[in-house]
Image (tube, helix red, strand yellow):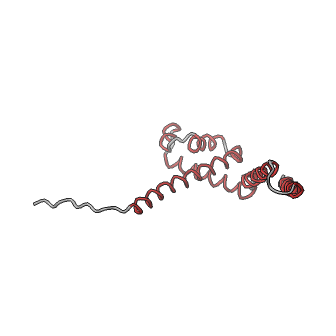
Amino acid sequence: MMEQDKTYPVKKKHLTRIFICANLRRVIDMEKIGRQVFLYDFYGELLTDHQKSVYEDVVLNDLSLSEIADERGISRQGVHDLVKRCDRILASYEEKLHLVERFFKNRENVARIRELSAGGDGDSSEVLAEIHRISGQILEEL
């Protein structure tokens, strides 16, 4: 006698957690790729031509490690190690120079100035004082 397959009801909240976890991983991956792209934009010219070429293929062109390894005649592990090394190099430049951090800070400040200059945020003398303060911060950063 065959045992019947038993089905158990799954509560919606359990499915939602899995869905959230899967999407969270995608968001984290996208943030990592975004960070890699910004670091490469600011510091990529400091890498060797070979490092730049492989890093661009992985990060910007979204090629797999195997595809790059086959194309260049090196091992997949070699490509992986090179990309990790480039990540560390670019991150160390950012730790020392903070160019990406400054870029985002200045971008926020300029957005705030645009918002203030569009009007509607109170007394015009207060708005001008705030714009003056923010523009001073930007000039100090430069």
Expressed as whole percent of the image width and height from the top left, the position of residue 128 reads 88, 54
Expressed as whole percent of the image width and height from the top left, the position of residue 93 reads 71, 54
Q: Residue furthest left?
A: 1
Which of 122 and 38 lies nearest the eye of the viewer? 122
Q: Residue furthest top?
A: 71
Identify the residue at image location x=57%, y=50%. 30
Which of 116 and 67 lies nearest the eye of the viewer? 116
Expressed as whole percent of the image width and height from the top left, the position of residue 5 reads 21, 59
Expressed as whole percent of the image width and height from the top left, the position of residue 41 reads 69, 45
- Number of numbered discs visible in the structure rendering: 0
Identify the residue at image location x=85%, y=55%. 127
Q: Quadrant of residue 122?
A: bottom right
Which of 67 and 130 lies nearest the eye of the viewer? 130
- Image quadrant where one finds the N terminus: bottom left
Identify the residue at image location x=56%, y=44%. 58
Q: Residue 74 vs residue 124: left or right?
A: left
Q: Residue 102 vs residue 47: left or right?
A: right
Q: Residue 36 vs residue 98: left or right?
A: left
Which of 15 and 73 lies nearest the eye of the viewer? 15
